[in-house]
Amino acid sequence: MSVDDDFIDRILEGEVSDEEAAEFQEWLKVPENLERFALRAELHSDLRRSLRRRQIQKSALEASTDGRVTDAVSAREQLTSPIPYSRQLLALTVTALVTAACILIAFVLPEGNSDPVPADAYAATVISNVNGLLTKSGSQWNDAPIPVGEYELQKGLLNLQFGGGVMVYVEAPARFDAISDKRVVLHSGRLSASVPPEGIGFAVETPEAEVIDFGTEFSVDVEGGASEVHVFDGLVRVHPGASSQRDVSRSVDLQASQALRISEGAAEPEGISIATDRFIRNFDEPRLNYARLVKRLSPLAFYRMPIRDRGLVSEPPEHSGTVLIGEGKRPPHARGVFVGGSLRVGADSTGCGGRVDSPPALSTGQFSLTVFVYLEAPVHGAMVATNLHDGQGNFGLSLDENGLLRAAIRSSDGDVSSAVGGSVLPQKTWRHVVVTTDGEQLHFYEDGKLVASTPCAAMAASDADTVWLGTDAEATRVWDGRLDEVALFDRALTEEEIAALHRTAQEEIARSR
């Protein structure tokens, strides 16, 4: 088939027959032809102006065989399968190929085809550093501008802004090279990126693959000879293989809620389940309906577990505490039940729990505790929250030897009443737990439902007993997982209020995923 500029112009205008369109599709499978087509297409200024997130996603997805990519591994097969052409479909397909090719040329061609990046050029800017220790070529780096170079984040969290407003969140430990304001090489560790339309084409390279963004939110995890790509919104293109062995014909398109693992030496990428809880994708704690509802119920203290360098922040602030730090690999922060942060305890992190030395007074004889718990691995006796110590204090919530959560309330005469959860606490799943006592009954709720109730006298008063979160005073009952959205009340929440909390939480969880 003979293809000249006039023919390409007719393709761009949709003025070809179905037979010509089918032949043209075969012609485009040659990389050199695709590049030629893209260069010609760039002469059409309206195509450049159309490089916007939603249009790119819509066009690229409609160019797939079935219109949707339902499996990460089958995506590559669908993209290379023949498709029935009509002139209307051709227009959409051409748009998809043009935008893909333009991105390919602008961001993926070897560096030898473009001007070299100056060694002193700035690739990014530090927006937020949460207890981070960043080194550049072996020396500590404390400046906000991030020049081109090699970096290692030895501890903490880092929020970087690249070109086009691309926001990148890096979790220690991680090694990465800032190549330019449009490209990062991640050698090891975890990275999340949020890419606006102006940042389309942002690329993350790993030892096993290259990820090209089409305006999206995605995360990359590099560890143990494998790279994982998780897409939470939008569309990315993954080129499997090391940089010296990369074959674009094996490329896979991933859209929202899809994930892929590329293992060193593996013949093909492997489709995997998306990990919605693994990655920190934002340092902010948004104003969610769940938090608003908790505040309307007038808690004495509300710990949202935001990602901050100030420690265990409370609303109101006078009841704030301290995040306890020990040995470990990852930061004491993790993604929360909705979005934002949670307190990570154990789970291979430096987090050892939290301590509140100025807790609110509990003196009414009534009490409620609300909390979201996330268990990585069962640890007998592991503590969620307590102020019981040396015969003082009045409440505790922990995991018993059977894998059930157990609530304990101490009365003024020293007697301790307890109620046990209705089922074994699952691993790697958020559970909403509420404990209440009204001076007569101790109630235990799991995910909005009453699962246990036992007689209980009025709770003993407590004015200044230290509250421990994720651990106890002796640091022997350390949690292994995460805690989020902890609230303390000096009254018993009603069944209707608890049901409303859980219902609102489920709505927030569905929205944030």
Image (cartoon, rainbow, N blue to C red):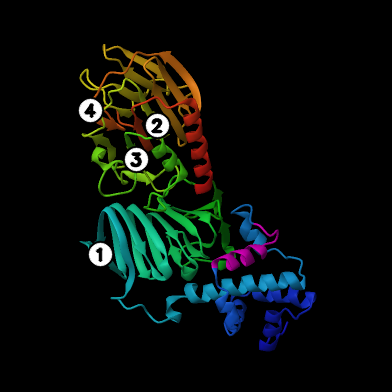
- Closer to us: mark 1 or mark 3? 3
| Left or right position of 214 against 300 | right
Q: Which residue is mark 3?
A: 344
Residue 335 locus on image (x, y percent) = 40, 46
Q: Earlier in the sequence, mark 2 or mark 1?
A: 1
| Left or right position of 61 against 162 | right
Q: Is 67 contained in the magenta span?
A: yes
Q: Which residue is mark 2?
A: 370
Residue sitting at x 23%, y 22% = 389
Q: Do the numbered discs 2 and 3 sit on residues whose CB atoms are within 8 Å?
A: no
Q: Earlier in the sequence, mark 4 or mark 3?
A: 3
Q: Which residue is mark 4?
A: 473
Q: Nearer the viewer, residue 57 or 101?
A: 57
| Left or right position of 454 against 78 | left
- Closer to us: mark 2 or mark 1? 2
Mark 1 burial class by Cα count in 10 Å: few <14, some 14-19, many 20+: few
Mark 4 burial class by Cα count in 10 Å: few <14, some 14-19, many 20+: some
Q: Identify the disc placed on residue 282.
A: none
